[in-house]
Amino acid sequence: MAVPDHGVRTEADVRKDGPRTAGTPRDPHDLAGLEAGLDALDSVQAGRTPLRDTLTRKVLPPVTAVALVLVVWQLLVWAEVAPDYKLASPSDVWGEVRDAWLQGTLLDYVWTSVSRGLLGFLMALAIGTPLGLLIARVGFVRAAVGPILSGLQSLPSVAWVPPAVIWLGLNDSMMYAVILLGAVPSIAGGLVAGIDQIPPLFLRAGRTLGATGLREARHIVMPAALPGYLAGLKQGWAFAWRSLMAAEIIASSPDLGVGLGQLLENGRNNSSMPQVFLAILLILLVGVAIDLLVFSPLERRVLRDRGLLAAR
């Protein structure tokens, strides 16, 4: 009695009969093994990075760059390319940092500006996100507001300071208004760009499953547009921070306190280059810290969730 062939072939059968031709039934176990192998190749190997590799790849490059800048800076001072009142030495700037720390004003300068910047950015986030959704999903609104939004992104933030002072006076409301006018267009524009890049198939599949209106925006549109939205958030923070610095430099009042922009302006008024360099370094430090502590982790998480972090 003949035994039915279920498609299982031994190594001896392969040597005897030769390779399987097209159209011959394939063993489902072979397909499962092939799929498992492909999944293993596609999966990201999650493991703890050795401390030495972290120091070499993440810490050493920026430290080396900062050291080179300090060396070149000191060489320029020794070469006397400019008078002392025009080019302060690194030691003079460090002395300014130490004096501000001992006087207890260093953290006050930073916190005054950072608190304003973060609160203004959160307000811009609350306004720019629904505005971006509205522009991207409603054709009439896109036609009416889209060009204005693009124009606002190209308008320098400092241009909003004089009218904001006239309208609102020298107070924190003026600062927040300048931040909103600088950050909201970037946030909304980033979200619109992210939504425009969503494959139409995703939207049709969501509607088929019953996701419409707010559910569609929450479960389909926002997750699919997240990379572009995140890019808009980074740009929005950059515009918010620059807008705040411009407002603090131009508008000064005892009621506003002394932020980093006002510290920079005070250094100019006092012809103190160490104070000017101190303000510039603190402004730069805050910008780098926000990017490393907030936006870089968010970007890595988004890329990891989409399987795009394997080669990084």
Image: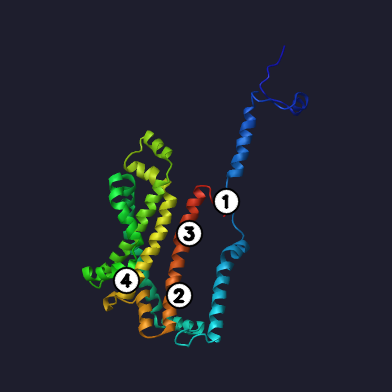
Distance Cα–Cα, label 1 vs label 2: 34 Å
Mark 3 vs mark 2, foreground winner is 2
| Residue contact between numbered discs 3 and 2, judged by CB atoms under 8 Å | no
Residue linked to disc 3: 296
Separation (CA) of disc 4 from disc 3: 27 Å
Tag in front: 2 or 4: 4
Q: Residue at x 47, y 82 (%)?
A: 93
| Mark 1 touches mark 3? (CB < 8 Å) | no
Mark sitting earlier along the chain (3/2): 2
Please name the residue that numbered disc 4 is placed on.
247
Instruction: Check contact, mark 1 vs mark 2: CB within 8 A.
Output: no
Q: Which of marks 2 and 4 is nearer the N terminus?
A: 4
- Mark closer to the chain start, 4 or 3: 4
Number of the label disc, if any, that sits on residue 281: 2
Q: How much space separates mark 4 and mark 1, taking CA atoms?
A: 42 Å
- Mark 3: secondary structure: helix
Query: Where is residue 200 shown, x and y percent of the image?
Result: 41, 39
